[in-house]
Amino acid sequence: MRLLVIEKDETLNHLITKSLEEVGYKSDSAYTVRDGKYFLDVRHYNLAIIDADFGLSEVFKFIDYAKEIYPLIKIIVISNDNSVETEIKVLKMGADDFIRKPLNFDLLITRINVALRSGKESQIKIKDLIIIKDEEKIIYNGKETYLKGKAFEVFTHLARYPNQVISKEQLLDAIWEEPELVTPNVIEVAVNQIRQKVDKVFKIDTIKTIRRRGYKFCYPKE
């Protein structure tokens, strides 16, 4: 799991990222909304924390941008504004949670855990194709096949964002704990396994290679 912290106060930003790392989360820091959007373009994040002090208009633009790229991303807004009216506005904007300052870091971590847990699905269903996550099983028209390990995780990740091009770097960052220690070739190996154990078995095409850009889930065809 990788989280993005968008907070212009350097001290608070550091305290948040330190708290995340202490409980096992990987995180990146951005100090402007613009930098936050840049991070979203180059890495995959499961959750983002953004400060409402950037202005509700900027926060809304960020939420809209983030959920357009990654529909399943969770977003927590933190704020100095303790009013219920602001909390309602933020939640209506599409945020998943609202936490008031000064931050209680134990509470923050708990709310992050809850948000991420609520985002986990046990299966993905796309037309006649069903992906059973706990069993690493794929079902198509009553026929079953199994795809193990990282290949299954690559397949599942791409299936979450159909018809969106996802680069090798984004896949590495989303799936491997230490992406810097593996080469992009492992993605090619995973995709070949998908084509052998899913596409060939079911006689369908699920993964399309976009030259020099990455891969996208293309079932059913656009």
Image (spheres, rainbow, N blue to C red):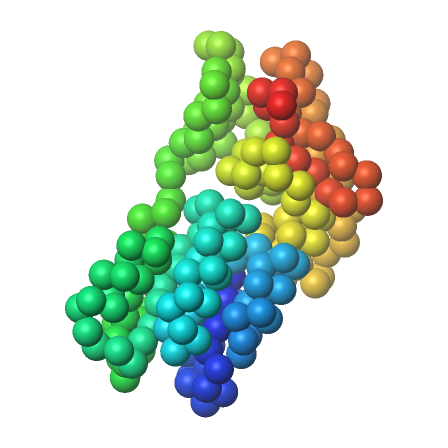
**Residue 33 point in image, percent of width and height:** 52, 70
Residue 194 can be seen in this image: no
Q: Is residue 81 left or right of residue 30?
A: left
Q: Is residue 43 left or right of residue 84?
A: right
Q: Is residue 122 left or right of residue 71?
A: left
Residue under the image location 28 percent in, 66 percent down: 98
Establish if 219 lies above or below 43.
above
Residue 183 can be seen in this image: yes
Q: Quadrant of the C terminus?
A: top right
State which quadrant residue 22 falls in: bottom left
Number of marks in the rendered image: 0
Residue under the image location 46 percent in, 10 percent down: 142
Establish if 211 lies above or below 107.
above
**Residue 199 point in image, percent of width and height:** 66, 20
Residue under the image location 28 percent in, 58 percent down: 91
Establish if 8 lies above or below 58.
below
**Residue 66 point in image, percent of width and height:** 50, 55
